[in-house]
Amino acid sequence: MLEEILAGGAAALGISLPENAPRLYRAYYTALTEANRQFNLTAIEGEDQAARLHFLDSLAVLRWEKLAGKNVIDVGTGGGIPGLALKIAEPALQLTLLDATEKKTAFLASLSEKLGLPCVCLTGRAEELGHESAWRETYDIAVARAVAETRILAEICLPFVKVGGKLLALKSADTDGELKAAESTVKALGGVIAAIHDYTLPGTDIPRRIAVIEKTAPTLEKYPRRWAAIQKRPL
Ligand code: SAH
């Protein structure tokens, strides 16, 4: 059952969950399943998988990063992973959920209200919103999972992050080459790959990784470029 898997997994990760977390994750799971019947929101097969592959995978961030009081943006959030799953565990974080697809952000806006977890839901392309002064270099932390390879991810996410803040990229563990290839890109964007945390997803043998990219200097105004350029010629 979802509740037991989450309790056991959180304990294995060394994370304590608020009292209302089991109820909120259950409601979140139900909402995801219902929405999936109407449009393809996220790949989930049953509550065990949702608990491990979505919720615990998100929660792992809290093993290394304290998010209470931080201003956090989830770039390419899809069904709210990892952002909304983190907000249930740490309601004191200020959350922005960004996705290019209106259907997804509309779902998240209504769900977050239903769960009593206020957040800002932004519809748009990260590489465009990252140029707007309302969002540029205003976040302590950017998080992202399954959006793009690290070079591309860094270009669309680092512009949102304040100097002194971080991008946390949730990755599979076989990304040594991808991260190595991103070192010069990250530097060009004002960042540095500061840490790589490897762990096994609790209750599975799936190796996972959180890459921590610290922002040490402002990102040049010319970044991010337009999507076609970012994809065709990653920095
Ligand atoms: N983070 C979620 C969803 C991953 S799917 C998860 O791990 O389950 C990738 C999502 O990123 C999609 O919802 C897609 O709409 C969004 N996306 C991809 N490129 C984007 C961009 N440049 N700007 C905004 N959203 C983007």
Image (cartoon, rainbow, N blue to C red):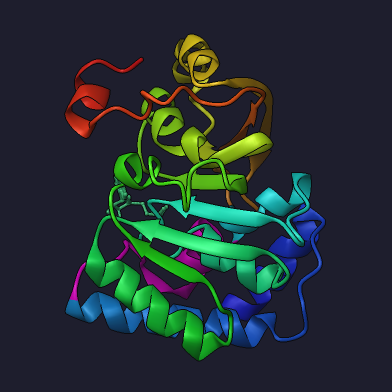
Question: Residue 71 location, x and y as percent?
Answer: 64, 56
- Measuring 22% from the left and 33% from the top, which residue is drawn there? 227
Of residue 40 and residue 221, the one placed in the foreground of this image is 221
- Measuring 18% from the left and 80% from the top, which residue is drawn there? 38
Image check: 205 left or right of 49? right
Quadrant in which the C terminus is drawn: top left
Residue 20 sits in which quadrant?
bottom right
Q: Is residue 49 magenta?
A: yes
Of residue 160 and residue 15, the one placed in the foreground of this image is 160
Q: What stretch is highlighted in magenta?
A: 39-55
Q: Is 48 located above or below residue 57 in the figure?
A: below
Image check: 73 left or right of 152? right
In this view, the residue farthest toward the front is 133
Q: Is 14 located above or below residue 207 in the figure?
A: below
Question: Residue 204 location, x and y as percent?
Answer: 58, 51
Q: Is 197 located above or below residue 140 in the figure?
A: above
Of residue 20 and residue 135, the one placed in the foreground of this image is 135
Q: Is residue 234 magenta?
A: no
The answer to whether residue 1 is visible is: no
Question: Residue 150 location, x and y as percent?
Answer: 44, 27
Please tell me how many numbered marks the rendered image carries.
0
The answer to whether residue 133 is visible is: yes
Image check: 34 left or right of 178? left
Of residue 59 and residue 216, the one placed in the foreground of this image is 216
Quadrant in which the N terminus is drawn: bottom right
Question: Residue 182 location, x and y as percent?
Answer: 47, 16
- Measuring 35% from the left and 60% from the top, which residue is drawn there? 78
- Measuring 28% from the left and 48% from the top, which residue is drawn there? 125
